[in-house]
């Protein structure tokens, strides 16, 4: 019964989104270009999306499937207005690993479903109280540096991926930069593709490409679905972990809004984006996958290409679903050397940090006020420094901890800070 339901949801999502894409293709960006750019965005998200399930010990194909379907669910709930791709969340790696040891994978899944329900309940609270209290809690001096931390805290990941062969990663990075700065037409819109292709060809020449993932992969291989088993202990263990991703979600939506120059907090509304994230996460837990989250890597690619049409991200979602069942395609993507992807990430993660700076400047944050300097300084040092707090089985670290501290400082320090504002908000 569950398998039939999943297939129905998949077919329905594919059909609806293909129809929407065909009907509403932008005259300035034809369907063929949309498809190419949409696939490119998956290249950006692929490494992180499959890395999380590999680290927690499950098949990455199920994560690709849940990311694709979850993204379509998100777009359905948010009226198809937000250019977002949902990929595997890194925030849950350590909790999932520990919970699986204590309660088993099936029990842990019930906790992940509960996390999705918590997101959904928060969306109802936002719907009830409005976004006014959210804007008071998250002014520009909190949101801006949190977005910067989202990008800069990932800088070491990009460097670690790139340092294995600086020649390959450097050429990949330079190729992407040249494409976005100097190329015209379609090539200017696909700098990530250009960087990956050039880097892959160079890797072939140097003989460092491992073809075993392609050789060992089956042509067609359906994801392995796992049903959750209700476990109160796992649920109580996992729910506190949702606090940090909830706060990060607000920063991510502001970041996407800054890139697209639209106020998604207002329309379709933070309550809808939170609900979309929650339902997608609950869906992932129901089929045996890891929680989803809005992907900063893809936001960086959107900023780089200036392609903000949500339809393109739905193409990315459909591509992820296709890749989840075509083993050879996934095998090829796995064969891309880490150094190639690392070179690209060096650019994309920096683009996220620049969005945070843009948020502060466009909101005209007043740094003559000591409170603002204190809030920004503490968020940056705690977030980039990787500070963590552990209370029993509950832990808060990195971006989540920095966000919480920033919110607390904003509430207790005297005075007020300016709300987030963006130029040319539509």
Image (cartoon, helix red, strand yellow):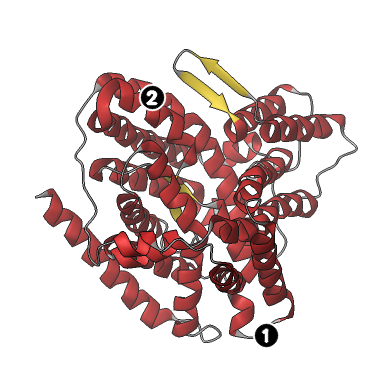
Residue located 28% across and 68% down the image: 14
Looking at the image, is 264 positioned above or below residue 152? Answer: below
Which class describes the residues within 10 Å of circle 1: few (<14), some (14-19), or many (20+)? few
Element type at mark 2: helix
Res. 330 visible in picture: no
Residue beneath disc 1: 184
Horizontal arrangement in the rendering, residue 404 relative to residue 74 (left or right): right
Residue with the mark numbered 2: 98
Could you tell which of marks 1 and 2 lies nearer the N-terminus?
Answer: 2
The residue under the point 67% across, 41% down is: 149
Q: Residue at x 38, y 43 (%)?
A: 53
Report the Cα–Cα distance between label 1 and label 2: 49 Å
In the image, 209 versus 192, the foreground residue is 209
Residue 206 occupies which quadrant of the picture? bottom right
Q: Quadrant for the C terminus, please.
A: bottom right
Going 77% across and 35% down the picture, which residue do you hit? 376
Query: Which numbered mark, 1 or 2, is in the foreground of this view?
Result: 2
Q: In this rendered view, identify the residue nearer to me: 172 or 19.
A: 172
Q: Secondary structure at mark 1?
A: loop
Image: 368 above or below 22: above
- Which of the pair 364/7 is nearer the observer? 7
- Residue 332 position within the rendered picture, expressed as x and y whole percent measured from the top left: 40, 66
Residue 357's label in the rendered image is none
Instruction: From the top left corner, tell me how far across and down residue 40 is, in percent.
Output: 50, 69
Q: Percent x, y for residue 365?
A: 80, 44
Task: Tell whether label 2 touches label 1 (CB within 8 Å).
Answer: no
């Amino acid at each position: 019964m569950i398998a039939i339901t999943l297939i129905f949801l998949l077919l329905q999502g594919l059909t609806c989104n293909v129809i929407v894409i065909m009907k509403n293709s932008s005259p300035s960006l034809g369907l063929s270009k949309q498809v190419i750019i949409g696939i490119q965005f998956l290249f950006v998200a692929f490494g992180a999306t499959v890395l999380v399930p590999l680290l927690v010990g499950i098949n990455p194909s199920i994560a690709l499937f849940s990311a694709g379907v979850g993204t379509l669910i998100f777009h359905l709930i948010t009226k198809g207005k937000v250019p977002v791709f949902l990929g595997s969340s890194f925030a849950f790696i350590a909790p999932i690993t520990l919970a699986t040891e204590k309660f088993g994978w099936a029990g842990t899944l019930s906790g992940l479903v509960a996390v999705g329900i918590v997101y959904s309940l928060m969306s109802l609270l936002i719907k009830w109280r409005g976004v006014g209290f959210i804007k008071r809690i998250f002014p520009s001096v909190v949101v801006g540096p949190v977005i910067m931390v989202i990008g800069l805290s990932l800088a070491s990941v990009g460097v670690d991926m790139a340092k294995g062969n600086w020649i390959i990663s450097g050429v990949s990075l330079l190729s992407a930069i040249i494409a976005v700065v100097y190329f015209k037409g379609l090539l200017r819109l696909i700098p990530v593709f250009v960087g990956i292709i050039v880097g892959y060809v160079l890797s072939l020449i140097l003989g460092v490409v491992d073809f075993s993932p392609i050789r060992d992969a089956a042509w067609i291989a359906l994801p392995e679905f796992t049903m959750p088993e209700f476990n109160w202990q796992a649920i109580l263990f996992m729910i506190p972990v949702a606090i940090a991703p909830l706060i990060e979600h607000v920063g991510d939506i502001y970041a996407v809004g800054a890139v697209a120059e639209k106020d998604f907090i207002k329309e379709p509304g933070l309550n809808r984006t939170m609900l979309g994230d929650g339902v997608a996460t609950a869906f992932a837990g129901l089929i045996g996958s890891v929680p989803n989250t809005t992907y900063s890597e893809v936001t960086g690619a959107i900023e780089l290409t200036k392609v903000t049409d949500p339809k393109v991200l739905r193409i990315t979602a459909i591509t992820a679903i296709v890749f989840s069942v075509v083993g050879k395609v996934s095998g090829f993507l796995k064969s891309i050397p880490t150094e190639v992807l690392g070179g690209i990430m060096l650019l994309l993660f920096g683009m996220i940090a620049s969005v945070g700076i843009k948020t502060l400047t466009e909101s005209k944050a007043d740094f003559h006020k000591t409170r603002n300097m204190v809030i920004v300084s503490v968020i940056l040092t705690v977030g980039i420094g990787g500070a963590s707090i552990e209370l029993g089985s509950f832990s808060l670290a990195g971006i989540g901890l920095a966000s919480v501290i920033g919110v607390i400082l904003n509430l207790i320090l005297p005075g007020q800070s300016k709300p987030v504002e963006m130029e040319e908000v539509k």
